[in-house]
Amino acid sequence: MGIFKPEVECASRDEMKALQTERLKKMVKNAYENVPFYKQKLDEAGVSPDDIQSIDDIVKLPFTLKTDLRDNFPYGLFAVPNSELVRIHASSGTTGKQTVVGYTKNDIDVWSESAARAIVATGGSKDDIVHISYGYGLFTGGLGLHYGAEYLGATAIPVSTGNTARQLQIFQDFGSTVLCCTPSYALYLGEYRRDNNIPLESLKLRAGIFGAEPWTDEMRKQIEALLGIEAYDIYGLSEIAGPGVSFDCECHNGMHVNEDYFYPEVIDPETLEPLPDGEIGELVFTCIGKEALPLVRYRTRDLCSLNHEKCACGRTTVRMSKPVGRSDDMLIIRGVNVFPSQIEHVLLQEGMQPNYLITVDRVNNLDTLTVDVEMNLDTFSDTVKDLEKAKKKLEAAMQSTLNVHASIRFVEYGTLPRSEGKAKRVIDKRKIK
């Protein structure tokens, strides 16, 4: 498959470090001189822009937290006046005040190029018709892939979310070749196609770019079978840029970070010390290519590892593993750390439907974990004996992986809510003081 910018994506480590050093020095100077928050943070840390002479000096810089963005709401961390901004995005604000992100024209170009690289990694070109079913608006998903497609010269269809029947009709009528949406919605689209007897031959889809929520390789295989495509992962977060910070290639062996614009580190979330390649820790990004919001060592809370080895696809950019969870959505069940992605992994490994709902409660001061799972249409018989046997088998698999008991409840196919955006997988009823 092609590579969008070989001189960068296939650069030697020395060439990449030189580029990163140049951009880090420029970014730190911009932040220090134009963002009072960063001037104060660097002064308190005893660091000046002159102390940053190499990308390796990044460890001298202080971390930035999401609370820092909220405390400086809305424009307090911007390094440019509003007259130089061409766009504003913001997070959903579901866990507090919105985090606001501003972009200069150059920032939009950086983001667009990053997303274009992700499309090319699927074998994409200007001949593709990119069907975008991420939400548009303050959420970065829709416009991120939209501008990436246009930057590549491909045709963008800004469908947005909802009206699933219409989505399938557009696939057929417009000849969509690349689908961009959340993996849970891709699965829903695939189920709708199957359940309504829409033949795969009527679709021209060849690839899907899915992100914005955790998903497993088992779920990837189900989506691929239901839609007749090859599925690719994409990673981003609104504070950094949106989709396109990193992306999957045909090797599906970690996502390539656009490290000429977004410098990654993985740290121990307790000691805050950098971790070597291969060790799981908290992902940290520094925006070395952005002007409006030059984030310094932003703690994403995503847990993953890095790999600097050259990929079989030919790219030399560092790869990040698929996040195994987030340090702030981790469930602690009777002292055991549990991630929803682990539960999904077990369900799919055991041949269950990837439609499930996790309920955590506290009964008589003891945490309980219940997982509602939809029954496969063609797997289960109607006998109580068979259902009980399957239930015990699944509970044993959960115990083996999670090291905590999970009660399984089978529900009829189609009864759990479907999602056109991020799927809500967890209900925590505990009242923990």
Image (cartoon, rainbow, N blue to C red):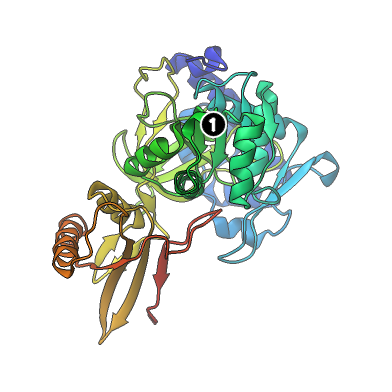
Residue at horizontal 65 percent and vertical 19 percent from the top: 126
Q: Quadrant of residue 398?
A: bottom left
In this rendering, is residue 148 above or below 220?
A: above
Q: 9 above or below 192? A: above
Q: Position of residue 249 (x, y in %)?
A: 44, 25
Q: Is residue 283 left or right of residue 262?
A: left
Answer left or right for 203 relative to 191. right
- Determine whether 95 is above or below 291 in the image: below
Across and down, in percent, residue 23 comes to: 60, 27
Q: Is residue 363 above or below residue 108?
A: below
- How many numbered discs, if any? 1
* Front one among 230 and 214: 230
Q: Could you tell me if residue 223 is visible in this image?
A: yes
Residue 187, image x, y percentages? 45, 46
Q: Secondary structure at mark 1?
A: loop
Crowd band around label 1 with a 10 angstrom C-alpha radius: few (<14), some (14–19), many (20+): many
Q: What amino acid does circle 1 point to?
A: Leu
The part of the image, by quadrant, that contains residue 119 is top right
Quadrant the C terminus occupies: bottom left
Residue 110: tell me if it is visible: no
Camera-nearest residue between 411 and 124: 411
Mark 1 highlights which residue? 203
Q: Residue at x 36, y 19 (%)?
A: 310
Q: Residue at x 32, y 62 (%)?
A: 373
User: What is the x, y in percent for residue 40?
Assistant: 63, 52
Residue at 48 percent across and 50 percent down: it is 188
Q: Which residue is the extreme one toward the front?
A: 197
Q: Quadrant of residue 125?
A: top right
- For the residue pair 18 and 305, the one nearer the viewer reads as 305
Residue that sits furthest to the right in the current view:
83
